[in-house]
Image: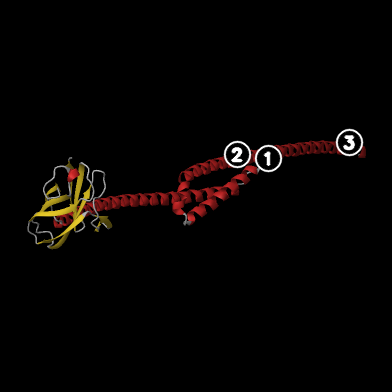
Amino acid sequence: METTQTPQNNTPQKKTKSKFSTTQILIAAIIVIVIIAGVLIGALFSKSNAAQEEMEQLKLTNEQLQLAGEYESLNNEYAQYENQTQLLANDSIVEKYAAAKAKVEKLLQELKNEKHKNAARIKELQDQIATLKSLLRHYVAQIDSLSRENQGLKTENEEIKDKNRKLNERVQSVSKTNEELNERMVLAEKLNVTGISLTALNKKGRTEKNITKARQLMVTFTIPQNNSTPVGEKTIYMRLVSPEGELLGNGGVFNFEGQNVKCSARKMIEYTGEEITGITIYWDVNATLNPGEYTVELFADNYRLASRKFTMKK
């Protein structure tokens, strides 16, 4: 009975051992597959992160280049107005723009030297360039406003200058007219003389045609009526000038235009405003006279009344 039961018990034990080995292999295979999959997934994920980081760096680099271009454009625009900074010499906008510009240049240089771009630094650069844009717009607006204001003032000044020029021209014209009127009034007050003659006389007081034989020279003239001339005692001064240009005689001096002038002879008359005819002034010859052209000049009241030339023959 015992011999028959032993084989029956051994057979199920062999079957159970074989089944357990297959399961272990399957589990091990699954674990290996999971591990390999995990490694592959990790590698792919790592590669994806690297690619994403590279894309991010390219994006930041591109933004940096765009901002550098914007800054260069702002600089060029600012340069067009830089020579007008004197218009805003007392305005803080110039100092603010210079400070912001320095920050932008510093950031650009730092980003250029960095191997890995920093989004925060790029954002700071964007903000600084935005500040520059705002300041430049404000700056240009003020420059344009001042330019228009200056142009308006320039136009106004030109109009004022033109008005002043026209006013000066009118003043000068009126002044000239007044001067002419005053001159006419002054001239109207001056004594007039007419009918001037120069005659040589011999020792008997008769007319002498030969000037070399003359013993006396007689100047005759008429003072016509002039109601504008102040009446009263008048002194007529006579100057006789020889053909050689020398003053004849020594009748003293008189004042003419602020200077003392020598005369040949003088005569005092009483002027009443009426015509006086036949006025004569004599000069005694004290040396032999030469033939030629003699000049007779008459003065009174600081005026030159007349100047005439006469040819005396031998």
Q: Residues within 10 Å of mark 2 (few under 14, many from 20)?
A: some
Marks 2 & 1, CB-CB < 8 Å contact: no
Q: Amino acid at mark 2?
A: Leu
**Residue holding disc 3:** 7
Cα–Cα span, label 2 and label 3: 78 Å
Residue 70 placement (x, y as % from top left): 51, 42
How far apart are labels 2 and 1 at the CA level? 18 Å
Q: Residue at x 54, y 47 (%)?
A: 126
- How many numbered dots are placed on residues in this image? 3
In 3D space, how far apart are the residues under numbered discs 3 and 1 (Cα atoms)? 60 Å
User: What residue did someone put label 1 on?
Assistant: 46
For the residue marked with disc 3, what is the amino acid? Pro
Residue sitting at 60 percent across and 48 percent down? 106
Judging by the rendered image, the residue that carries numbered circle 2 is 58
Secondary structure of the residue carrying tag 2 is: helix
Colour option used: secondary structure
**Residue 65 lies in what quarter of the image?**
top right
